[in-house]
């Protein structure tokens, strides 16, 4: 008896969507897996559609990196490269043609208009630095569109993001297991969408773990000030005591805090523990190496292209907000809290 597409998917241990892609000769399935699925389809009497030259036109994707003019370039870690690597890898797999461009708020509408005029098939948008409340330009955009590292709650916009709740929960749980109850947070003073959400998540996960948030332990560093180390020291001089541990919104801020604490005569992790976020190359710029939350930015880029491919292939109007989990990488900057009060 002829197996259904769903049954073939079960036998091949893939999704029905993957079987449909092979049946219709569409990209998005690894070559070795495509061959296995094709064999099962043929054995069950299916005819795999072959595209003629007109149908086999390569899809053109535009990758837009949104740059905020106030963002300090040298303070970025390697996540930009990692996201782009994932996007490029997924485009090769799907036989997509990829173009890359930078865009700022003043040029955003014009660039999106150019994408339509130049007949791009879809747009991926790295929105980490996008801080504006104007969302309609994305909701009304007629081409398939997926935003990376920026969610728009309540809006009709596809997105793929890192699950900040899981990341913060893992970091705070680790500190709590070590015996910490006085836990602080390091973030940006400037309003950036991704970091705003991560900060709210910290408060939420502290509450979930029955830990009290002390406002004196929340440090918002000024990203306009190049020397974050001096920025932290100046802020700490206005606080009576320091927490016994810090969770930072990214690895750059975590390292700045470690250098500042050392300059003040405090030891990491003996006096203060520190956890970063991203698991970037800078984690190895300090001794001991930085404990951090690993975010798979390459995979995030791949998922954005995969979602875009599904929208294009199925002409889908569904909105998906995908979240990718994290892993805590324990290195040398966390330890049980000291028996004494840490003074700034």
Image: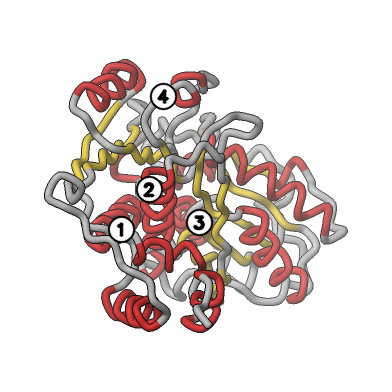
Query: Toward the viewer: 324 or 193?
Result: 324
Classify residue 61 as left or right of residue 209. left
| Mark 1 crowd level (few <14, some 14–19, many ≥20, 10 Å Cα) | some
Q: Which mark is residue 68?
A: none
Coloring basis for residues: secondary structure
Cα distance, mark 4 to mark 3? 37 Å
Q: Please tell me which of labels 1 and 3 falls first in the chain.
A: 1
**Residue that carries the numbered disc 2 in the rendered image:** 313
Classify residue 312 as left or right of residue 245. left
Q: Secondary structure at mark 4?
A: loop
* Residue 319 on image: x %, y %: 56, 40
Classify residue 140 as left or right of residue 84. right
Mark 2 or 3: the one toward you: 2
Q: Please tell me which of labels 2 and 4 falls first in the chain.
A: 4
Please say whether residue 185 is visible from this viewpoint.
yes
Extreme residue toward the right, this view: 210
Q: Tell me the residue at 62%/66% (across/down).
A: 273
| Mark 3 crowd level (few <14, some 14–19, many ≥20, 10 Å Cα) | many
**Residue that carries the numbered disc 4 in the rendered image:** 141
Kindly indicate the quadrant of the structure image that contains residue 280.
bottom left
Cα distance, mark 1 to mark 4? 25 Å
**Residue that carries the numbered disc 3 in the rendered image:** 254
Cα distance, mark 2 to mark 3? 42 Å
Mark 4 or 3: the one toward you: 4
**Residue that carries the numbered disc 1 in the rendered image:** 26
Q: Please tell me which of labels 2 and 3 falls first in the chain.
A: 3
Kindly indicate the quadrant of the structure image that contains residue 41.
bottom left
């Amino acid at each position: 008896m002829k197996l259904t597409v769903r049954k073939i998917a079960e036998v091949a241990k893939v999704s029905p969507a993957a079987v449909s892609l092979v049946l219709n000769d569409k990209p998005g399935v690894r070559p070795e897996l495509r061959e296995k699925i094709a064999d099962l389809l043929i054995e069950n009497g299916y005819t795999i559609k072959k595209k003629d030259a007109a149908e086999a036109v390569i899809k053109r994707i535009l990758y837009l990196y949104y740059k905020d003019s106030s963002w300090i370039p040298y303070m970025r870690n390697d996540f930009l490269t990692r996201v782009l690597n994932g996007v490029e890898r997924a485009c090769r797999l799907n036989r997509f043609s990829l173009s890359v461009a930078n865009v700022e708020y003043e040029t955003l509408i014009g660039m999106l208009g150019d994408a339509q005029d130049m007949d791009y098939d879809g747009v991926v948008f790295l929105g980490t630095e996008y801080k504006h409340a104007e969302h309609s330009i994305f909701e009304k955009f007629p081409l398939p569109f997926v935003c990376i590292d920026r969610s728009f709650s309540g809006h009709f916009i596809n997105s793929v993001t890192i699950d900040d709740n899981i990341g913060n929960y893992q970091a705070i749980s680790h500190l709590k297991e070590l015996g910490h109850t006085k836990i602080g947070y390091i973030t940006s003073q400037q309003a950036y969408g991704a970091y705003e959400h991560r900060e709210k998540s910290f408060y939420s996960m502290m509450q979930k773990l029955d830990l009290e948030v002390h406002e004196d332990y929340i440090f918002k560093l000024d990203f306009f000030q190049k020397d974050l180390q001096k920025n932290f020291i100046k802020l700490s001089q206005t606080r009576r005591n320091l927490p016994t541990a810090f969770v930072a919104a990214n690895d750059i801020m975590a390292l700045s805090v470690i250098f500042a604490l050392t300059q003040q005569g405090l030891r990491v992790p003996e006096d203060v523990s520190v956890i970063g976020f991203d698991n970037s190359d800078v984690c190895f710029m300090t001794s001991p190496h930085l404990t951090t939350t690993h975010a798979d930015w390459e995979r995030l880029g791949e998922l954005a292209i995969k979602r875009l491919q599904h929208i294009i292939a199925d002409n889908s109007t569904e909105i998906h907000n995908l979240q990718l989990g994290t892993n805590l990488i324990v290195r040398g900057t966390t330890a049980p809290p000291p028996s004494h009060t840490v003074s700034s």
